[in-house]
């Protein structure tokens, strides 16, 4: 009887112990699942921190000290300030000029020293331009490499009305006057920008180049229109054949002709073509078979068309420094009173349209800086303001449908740009 009671008690204890173990097991499993779910939630709500790259390096891993080249500051002074030794400075200056030329250091250019967290110098960076830089790897014998920064183009729109000049109108519209120069190049065969009048209007779709969030002074025109004296001329970009991208008018004819309307940008016509003009130096009337463009000394002068330089010389009592270009069997052009010629230009050279051939001056028989520009047709002087331009190939029939689609889209976009009304 006593043994049976002991057996029953033992069995009951065994059952209680088993239940307790099972409860502990399930409780632990539940906690494990709950922790697992918690871990998953945390992982979803806290993303990995992005790596910030600059100069092609994870910039936040370094202690960075920035500096800017000061006026008259030498490279050695900059490097001494960063703790370089005399030997290190000597080694750095031995880099090939194609990678780093210390003679081209300019005030305002940026540089930086990158150190490890223990203050050990690792890299010296010199920004050669807003778009390029040189990295000196200090840990590897100042090994130098040149890099280009990635850039992007951002599109913008502007429209304005001319009250005094296109240059001023651009500034008044809140954009860069450089766009006025680009417009003069695009419309140079169809619009005389020396003759624009108050009330003329322009509309532009243009792009500006950026490095990261820093804007550069590089622009391009993506589409444009200019309304002069009630006549609107469009510039629609399109690519066909081997000519590459050109600008065309609304009818599909190229805006690029054989000759530019003028051999320099903007400025003022001080004297026109005449058979009897009062000469300010000689104090008498005589023929002036050219057009005088008043402009500051040093203003670039372009060849109005492609051709061969047949004369380059100096006339003490006449045109001063001058260049004559033969464009074809019919036309020659002459550019006089230049302050200097384009570097390396010589007789016999072939020049392209819009190539700089010299710079405005006041050499020879002249009372002030200006360009005396002359055109001869079959050996006879003609008015430069009336010569006809010979356009390049128009849009072909094979490309007409594609061009029309581009044209319609851009004309609609240009028309939708709100005019900026400002006081100049």
Image (spheres, rainbow, N blue to C red):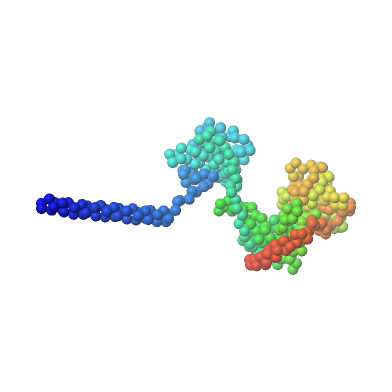
* Residue furthest left as drawn: 2
Q: Position of residue 7 (x, y in %)?
A: 16, 51
In the image, taking residue 35 as reference, residue 201 lies left or right, namely right
Residue pictured at 34% horizontal, 56% vertical: 34
Q: Quadrant of residue 255?
A: bottom right
Q: Nearer the viewer, residue 315 or 149?
A: 149
Q: Nearer the viewer, residue 235 or 173?
A: 235
- The quadrant of the picture occupied by the C terminus is bottom right
Numbered label tally: 0
Q: Position of residue 345 (x, y in %)?
A: 77, 43
Residue 90 sits above or below residue 315 on the image: above
Q: Position of residue 348 (x, y in %)?
A: 82, 42
Q: Quadrant of residue 91?
A: top right
* Residue furthest top as drawn: 87
* Residue furthest front as drawn: 1
Q: Position of residue 37 (x, y in %)?
A: 37, 55
Residue pictured at 63% horizontal, 67% vertical: 418
Residue 304 in sight here: yes
In the image, taking residue 405 as reference, residue 135 lies left or right, namely left
Residue pictured at 40% horizontal, 56% vertical: 41
Residue 219 sits above or below residue 160 on the image: above
In the image, taking residue 415 as reference, residue 72 lies left or right, namely left
Residue pictured at 53% horizontal, 46% vertical: 54
Q: Nearer the viewer, residue 257 or 34?
A: 34
Residue 284 in sight here: no
């Amino acid at each position: 009887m006593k043994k049976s009671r002991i057996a029953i008690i033992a069995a009951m204890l065994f059952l209680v112990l088993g239940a307790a173990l099972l409860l502990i097991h399930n409780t632990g499993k539940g906690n494990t699942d709950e922790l697992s779910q918690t871990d998953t939630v945390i992982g979803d709500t806290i993303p990995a921190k992005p790596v910030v790259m600059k100069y092609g390096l994870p910039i936040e891993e370094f202690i960075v000290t920035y500096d800017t080249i000061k006026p008259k500051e030498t490279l050695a002074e900059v490097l001494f300030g960063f703790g370089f030794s005399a030997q290190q400075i000597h080694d750095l200056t031995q880099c090939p000029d194609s990678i780093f030329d210390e003679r081209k250091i300019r005030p305002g250019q940026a540089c930086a020293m990158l150190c490890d967290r223990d203050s050990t110098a690792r890299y010296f960076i010199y920004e050669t331009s807003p778009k390029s830089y040189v990295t000196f790897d200090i840990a590897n014998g100042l090994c130098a490499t040149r890099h280009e920064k990635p850039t992007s183009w951002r599109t913008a729109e502007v429209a304005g009305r001319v009250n005094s000049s296109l240059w001023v109108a651009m500034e008044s519209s809140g954009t860069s006057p450089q766009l006025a120069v680009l417009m003069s190049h695009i419309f140079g065969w169809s619009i005389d920008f020396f003759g624009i009048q108050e009330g003329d209007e322009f509309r532009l779709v243009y792009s500006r180049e950026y490095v990261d969030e820093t804007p550069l002074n590089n622009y391009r025109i993506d589409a444009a229109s200019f309304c002069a004296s009630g006549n609107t001329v469009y510039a629609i970009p399109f690519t066909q054949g081997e000519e590459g991208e050109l600008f065309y008018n609304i009818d599909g004819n190229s805006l690029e002709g054989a000759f530019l309307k003028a051999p320099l940008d903007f400025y003022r016509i001080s004297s026109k073509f005449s058979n009897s003009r009062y000469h300010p130096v000689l104090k008498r009337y005589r023929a002036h078979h050219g057009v005088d463009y008043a402009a500051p000394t040093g203003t670039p002068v372009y060849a109005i068309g492609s051709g061969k330089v047949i004369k380059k010389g100096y006339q003490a009592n006449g045109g001063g420094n001058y260049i004559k270009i033969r464009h074809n069997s019919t036309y020659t052009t002459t550019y006089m009173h230049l302050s200097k010629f384009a570097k390396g230009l010589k007789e016999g050279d072939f020049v392209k349209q819009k190539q700089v051939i010299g710079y405005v001056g006041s050499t020879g028989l002249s009372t002030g800086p200006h360009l005396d520009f002359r055109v001869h047709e079959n050996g006879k002087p003609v008015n430069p303001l009336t010569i006809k331009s010979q356009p390049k190939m128009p849009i072909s029939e094979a490309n007409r449908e594609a061009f029309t689609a581009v044209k319609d889209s851009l004309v609609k976009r240009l028309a939708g740009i709100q005019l900026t009304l400002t006081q100049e």
